[in-house]
Amino acid sequence: MTTLDQSRHLATAIPGPLSIELTKRRTDAVSHGVGVTMPVFAKRAGGGIIEDVDGNRLIDLGSGIAVTTIGNSSPRVVDAVRAQVADFTHTCFMVTPYEGYVAVCEHLNRLTPGSGEKRSALFNSGAEAVENAIKIARAYTGKQAVVAFDHAYHGRTNLTMGLTAKSMPYKSGFGPFAPEIYRAPLSYPYRDGLVNKDLGSNGELAAERAIDVIDKQIGAGNLAALLIEPIQGEGGFIVPAPGFLATLLAWCRDHNVVFIADEVQTGFARTGAMFACEHEGIEPDLMCIAKGIADGMPLSAVTGRAEIIDAPHASGLGGTYGGNPVACAAALATIETIELDGLVERAAQIEALMKDRLSRLQADDDRIGDVRGRGAMIAVELVKSGTSEPDPELTKKLVSGAHAAGVVVLTCGTYGNVLRFLPPLTISDELLLEGLDVLALILADL
Ligand SMILES: *Cc1c(COP(=O)(O)O)cnc(C)c1O
């Protein structure tokens, strides 16, 4: 990592000849059901750079989808993983446990919002964390129904596909889905505000709209859990209007409904707080945590109030690999790095830098409908000039231009018209601004 030059460099066209060769092998060997955003093969990565097999150095504005938040191959993580892998790679925590798992849970109980007694359980993926949070909520309440929101993304397993809103590419043709899943309207300030100004800015009103649907179509007496991303990820980096989450949480408390915050994408310093719920001052009953937790090693968690998370019978929760010791060592080093290097504060700096640059761009370009997000989780919603109509074609062109110029940037949103920025917090200001300048130039040309 120390030898990886922190500058954008194009050695070949993108993709280069070695990536093209590997893409041929990939086409022959890998299921065509697995998609790829950018057909370049990675060789090394660190700081704010991904170097490909052809020697191109790309500016990383994606962090492998909000995973390598502390920077790829972060030095403390590399050391911790090396040491753990030399000691033992696996015993299964359910067979002979080990300290690393317990230590990760202690940190999660300390770092998550809420001062009461908490406990955690570890798994492998975000989807697995969501599935387990729902198992726990059902065991605790003795009820079955789960409500998720418009534009939600919760994963690709059967239960989490059902909870996810968007059909293509996540669900189409893969049903039937699990029963007892319902959907409620979200607070989407930009689009709500186009229809009704009050609804766009008043989170309590938006929550009342959702609660009305929940009351009429499900009934609190049947509802085990309300599941929500405090800032939506795949759905378009939608930050709900102030008061929306708090009003929903208060309703859940009054009706014995478990409030589950899916912080898989928003957690671990990403939004300028350790967890996004802190921005709204709310303390969820359960939290699902994954992506940024272990710098890319597969690990996820459910953390929450002890009385709820202890509800399942002994051995009702678990899994062969859940809380793997190498992944736990990586998580402990990740937490240490966030705290010692002040990365929560760094995410807030990145927000200021990006919002300043992007708002100035928006002032000169009416195809930028909205600039939103928190911390190093910032999005731009692109619309047809002078309207609020989503422009997915423009978004596609802009992103492919950025890729060709050596900037890794992702899209999201129900309408495919949202550019999302998830830079590693270790990126330099210079690289970050250069990445945005490249995008601005391409947009001006389109
Ligand atoms: C990515 C994501 C998931 C699924 O995580 P996987 O590790 O891909 O299973 C769930 N919820 C949210 C909010 C996510 O962003």
Image (cartoon, grey):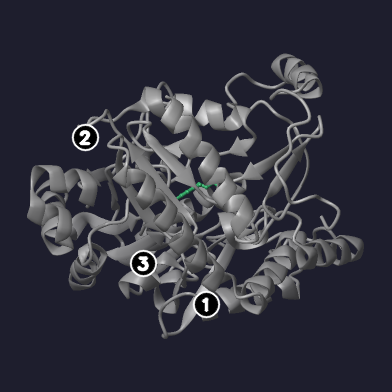
Inspect the image, locate mark 2, and give the three-letter code of the amino acid beneath it: Ser
> Badges 2 and 3: C-beta atoms under 8 Å apart?
no
- Of callouts 1 and 3, the N-terminal one: 1
Front-most of residues 37 and 101: 37
N-terminal-most mark, 2 or 1? 1
Locate residue 4, reporting x and y percent. 81, 50
Find disc 3 in the rendering and name its residue.
Answer: 140
- The picture places residue 21, in percent across and down from the top left corner, at 79, 17
Element marked by disc 3: helix
Could you tell me which residue is drawn at 21 percent across and 62 percent down?
244
Residue drawn at (29%, 32%), measured in percent from left and top?
A: 383
Residue 361 visible within the image: yes
For the question of whether residue 95 can be seen, the reply is: no
* x and y percentages locating residue 308 in the rendered image: 40, 72
Crowding at dot 3, Cα within 10 Å, few <14 / some 14-19 / many 20+, comes out as some
Q: Is mark 2 within 8 Å of ligand 1?
A: no
Disc with the residue nearer the chain's start (2 vs 3): 3
Callout 1: helix, strand or loop?
helix
Left or right of residue 243, residue 73 in this image: right
Three-letter code, disc 1: Leu
Q: Nearer the viewer, mark 2 or mark 3?
A: 2
Image quarter (top left, top right, bottom left or bottom right) of the N terminus: bottom right
On residue 388, the disc is 2
Q: Which one is in front, 345 or 102?
A: 345
Residue pointed to by mark 1: 111
